[in-house]
Image: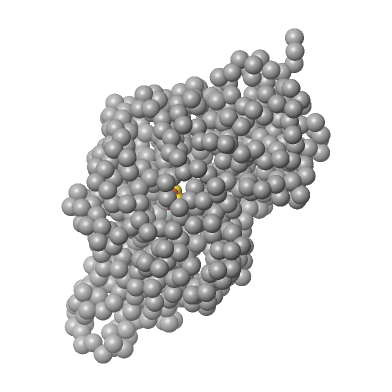
Amino acid sequence: VVEKKKIYFNEFNVPTENTIYFPYSSGLLRAYVQKFNIINHNYEFMPFLFIRENSKEILKKYDNPSIACFSSSVWSHQLNIKLARLVKEKFPDCLIVFGGPQIPLDDCIYVNYPFIDLCVFGEGEQMFHKILIDNLENKVIKHKTLRAQKTITDLDTIPSPYSNDIFKYLLRDYPNIKFKAIIETNRNCPFHCSFCFWGQSGIKNRLSYHGLDYIETEAKWLANNKIEYIFCADANFGMFKRDINVAEIYSKIKLFYKYPEKIRVCYGKNASDTIFQTAKILSSAGLAKTVTLALQSNDKNVLKNIGRENIKQKEFINLRKKYIEANIPTYIEIILGLPGETYETFLDGLNFVLESSDNSQIFIYHCEILPNTEMSSKDYIKKYKIQTVTTPLHEIHGNIRDDETEQEYNEIIISTESMDVETWKKCAVISWLIQLFYSLKIGNKLINFICSRFQLKYTDFFEFLFHSNLKEVSFLKRVADNVSNGLSRSQSDKRFGPIYWEPEEFVFLSIILSKQNFYNCLFDITINFLQNKKISYNIDEIIKIFDNQKKEILDLNQFMDIQEYAEKVILHGRKSNLSNIKTQKNT
Ligand code: SF4
């Protein structure tokens, strides 16, 4: 009997408490190559390595490997590198293969990491098959990155790792882990956003699709196996008419099986009617209660610089109205640090969002430079005088990283030709304050009242707050300073659970522990603000609005403790606008 060659897949996703994604990319590779008899005859697929731990511990799981495959993303690249080096040292004949968005298009990776034998750039399934065959025939050419020549036109040629039970054993062997699933109903993206891997990188932007039967069979497997949470990796869900059918499939399945509980989708960037219809279907099935409106910036010049001219202001306002009428909450995304953005345009954009957002969630992200994007090119960086800082990656809502595992990093823009570092820091603090006050509802009623009653700009209040002596503002200023000096923005406190929080979430939870103190200080600041603006006000009106504001915040004593509060109100409640939260006392 010929001993089969052992293949090990390494795909370390980010865990949140006891939940983690199935190693989907590796599962697709395995499902694809297992269609071929020659592969099954010659290779043995070893259990997926997907739990992040010390590289030496992971190495112990290797036994005479023939091929070790590493799926590299920003959250796993350093661990992969360290582990791959150890594997090569211990098993010099093992072929080390890397793939994923961290892989550079050229061959420079082999200079720094000569223990990597091969990389695959772009779609991996067919290339992986070629590598396995070449390996059998001793034809592998090392240190030469393989690049898919054309996109896979019929995605159904890749069997589903779910429907084919490739992950079934994980459910049996890890009963304490709640697995989450990634799915794709189509692949690639027709847009060209400069900060995105799909927007550039030389990938041919031709879209390919799974058939509806494939999607339904996969959905049934996920429901049958009680998978609660699904992330749909389509770049523009709802942009195509057939997405309505996809939404119907999942809502029908949920009605029958009660699973999945939630699907997260990234909606298309232009305001088409099909997006609205798919959102309505998913929302009424309780699968995806909210819709993202990815604005990123409200400035035409910035949108041009980032290759994202696909959102029109008028359409945005109309779409917002439609969602409000249909009672579908939206969350709006903005990015800080984009090239061309100034202090004024950034604040104007925030005012536009706040004026038109009517209780939406607002998420303001820091612009990150990812490999293989237009934004990462030397010319682009030079053109916009981009300055970045490398910070340790502590994934928001991911488990607090154990010092034993390899540190991962991300690269954040902190200055451009149109925004210096000090201004970036000020914008970062104002952004956190807006999210704290508005999205987390510490002060939404108050701000709405002041701005509409006295006809003031929303950002006037936040600029005033920035200069106040509120201790929460001083804390956020320190966080901004730290980020600009290369520290992570993520915050943690064991009382709030074992995961990282956004700065505004961390401040929110701290306020919940001593709410009265905070509102007393805020009251004084509000009065100062009105006096500073020379506005005559009725003090009873202000007292009343503060009383109403405090009622917006769920009380801590409705929960077992602050950890349960953090989990229900922020971790699971934020994107659904902190609504429909069932506490122990009110279920
Ligand atoms: S950000 Fe979204 S729309 Fe833009 S290129 Fe990437 S996937 Fe496409």
The residue lying furthest to the top in this view is: 1
Q: How many marks?
A: 0
The location of residue 254, given as percent across then percent down, is 31, 31
Residue 54 placement: quadrant:
top right
Q: Nearer the viewer, residue 472 or 15?
A: 15
Q: Residue at x 76, y 25 (%)?
A: 138
Residue 89 placement: quadrant:
top right
Q: Is residue 387 visible?
A: yes
Question: Quadrant of the image for the N terminus?
Answer: top right
Q: Is residue 385 left or right of residue 286?
A: right
Q: Nearer the viewer, residue 265 or 404?
A: 265
Q: Residue at x 48, y 51 (%)?
A: 199
- On screen, residue 47 above or below 289: above
The location of residue 320, given as percent across then percent down, is 24, 56
Q: Nearer the viewer, residue 525 or 460?
A: 460
Q: Is residue 232 left or right of residue 84?
A: left
The location of residue 560, given as percent across then percent down, is 40, 50
Q: Is residue 69 left or right of residue 496?
A: right
Q: Nearer the viewer, residue 559 or 6?
A: 6
The location of residue 185, given as percent across then percent down, is 40, 34
